């Protein structure tokens, strides 16, 4: 096991059970299939920001979601 993976597993052990389950599902999915694409550094940073925002309870309003769907014809 790499040092980074070991550190990640240690950090996940300290999370609430639901977040541990989410991390476990992600790891099992990664181990089961070869990734079809790789995230760019910018996409990884965007994902990290999204997780921080979600942890703070910052989510789009129903109106913001509806407006976004309208842009895609729904």
Image (cartoon, grey):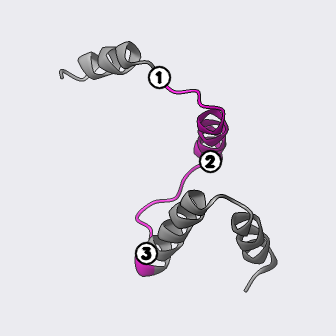
Q: Is residue 57 above or below residue 61?
A: below
Q: Nearer the viewer, mark 2 or mark 1?
A: 1
Q: Going 25% across and 16% down the picture, which residue do you hit?
A: 70
Cα separation between marks 3 and 2: 18 Å
Magenta stretch: includes residue 24: no
Going from N to C along the chain, the mark reached first, 2 or 1, is 2
Q: In the rendered image, which residue does mark 2 sit on?
A: 44
Indicate the position of residue 24 as horizontal and vertical percent values. 54, 71
Give yes or no for contact between labels 3 and 1 (Cβ–Cβ under 8 Å): no
Helix or strand or loop: what does disc 3 sit on?
A: loop
Indicate the position of residue 73 as horizontal and vertical percent values. 18, 21
Give yes or no for contact between labels 2 and 1 (Cβ–Cβ under 8 Å): no
Q: Nearer the viewer, mark 3 or mark 1?
A: 1
Q: Going 69% across and 65% down the picture, which residue do you hit?
A: 12
Query: Which numbered disc covers residue 60?
Result: 1
Query: Which numbered disc covers residue 34?
Result: 3
Crowdedness near tag 2: few (<14), some (14–19) or many (≥20) residues, C-alpha within 10 Å? few
Looking at this view, name the residue that lies furthest to the left: 74
Cα separation between marks 3 and 1: 32 Å
Helix or strand or loop: what does disc 1 sit on?
A: loop
> In this picture, which residue range is highlighted in magenta?
32-59
Q: Is residue 58 left or right of residue 5?
A: left
Q: Going 42% across and 80% down the picture, which residue do you hit?
A: 32
Q: Going 44% across and 72% down the picture, which residue do you hit?
A: 29
Q: Is residue 32 above or below residue 49?
A: below
Q: Quadrant of residue 19?
A: bottom right
Disc count in the image? 3
């Amino acid at each position: 096991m790499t040092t980074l993976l070991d550190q990640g597993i240690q950090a996940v052990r300290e999370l609430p059970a639901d977040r541990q389950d989410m991390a476990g599902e992600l790891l099992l999915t990664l181990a089961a299939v070869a990734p079809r694409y790789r995230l760019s550094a910018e996409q990884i940073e965007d994902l990290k920001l999204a997780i921080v925002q979600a942890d703070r309870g910052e989510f789009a309003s129903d109106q913001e979601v509806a407006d976004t769907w309208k842009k895609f014809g729904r």
